Image (tube, rainbow, N blue to C red):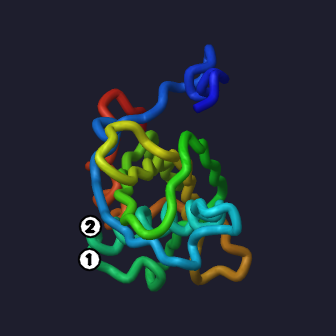
């Protein structure tokens, strides 16, 4: 155990998220290949879990194949804050919440939890911007109503629109 302060506790940095910060939940399994040479989950796998949490929710909540809509969400921004290591073989619970719904974009936060603890092991930020799926230039367009109906129930208390 290190005597160094937890970076999550630094002044000005958002508090470490807990299970109560999220609205929708999904459990994903970890695989042997997800761990890197150091025995913890590879960074790219965190982003795969974020993508799965968001898009699985959209499929289930909308009831449509989101890839076939005339307007599709493309990832415009992602980031991750790491708090502690996670890895194979235990499953990971993903918590999903929406911070903002705009006319053509959605800002998600995804918490990753492994084990019984209340604090997230990592938290991702994931921004979808909706573009015209029929236009080769993929111009920004308003999000489809079916997507808006799927994401608005995930808005956090006090979240903006």
Q: Secondary structure at mark 1?
A: loop
In the rendered view, tell whether residue 120 sits above or below residue 94: above
* Left or right of 18 in this view: 131: right
Q: Secondary structure at mark 2?
A: helix
In 3D space, how far apart are the residues under numbered discs 1 and 2 (Cα atoms)?
6 Å
Rendered residue at 59%/44% (across/down): 82
Q: Is residue 155 visible?
A: yes
Q: Quadrant of residue 43?
A: bottom right
Residue density around tag 2, few if under 14, some if 14–19, many if 20 or more, within 10 Å: some
Q: Quadrant of the C terminus?
A: top left
Rendered residue at 50%/72% (across/down): 71
Rendered residue at 56%/21% (across/down): 9
Q: Quadrant of residue 54?
A: bottom left
Q: Position of residue 49 (x, y in %)?
A: 49, 65
Q: Which mark is residue 63?
A: 1
Q: Which residue is mark 2?
A: 61
Residue density around tag 1, few if under 14, some if 14–19, many if 20 or more, within 10 Å: few
Q: Position of residue 35 (x, y in %)?
A: 59, 69
* Left or right of 31 in this view: 158: left
């Amino acid at each position: 155990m290190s005597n160094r302060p937890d970076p999550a506790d630094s002044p000005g940095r958002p508090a470490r998220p807990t299970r109560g910060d999220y609205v929708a939940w999904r459990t994903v399994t970890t695989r042997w290949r997800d761990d890197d040479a150091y025995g913890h989950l590879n960074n790219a796998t965190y982003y795969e879990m974020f993508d799965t949490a968001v898009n699985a929710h959209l499929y289930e909540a909308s009831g449509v194949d989101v890839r076939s809509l005339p307007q599709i969400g493309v990832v415009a921004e992602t980031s991750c804050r790491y708090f502690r290591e996670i890895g194979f073989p235990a499953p990971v619970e993903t918590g999903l919440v929406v911070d903002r719904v705009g006319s053509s974009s959605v800002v998600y936060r995804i918490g990753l939890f492994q084990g019984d603890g209340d604090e997230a092991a990592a938290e991702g930020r994931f921004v979808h911007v909706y573009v015209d799926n029929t236009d080769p230039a993929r111009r920004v367009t308003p999000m489809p109503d079916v997507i808006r109906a799927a994401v608005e129930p995930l808005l956090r208390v006090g979240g903006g629109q």
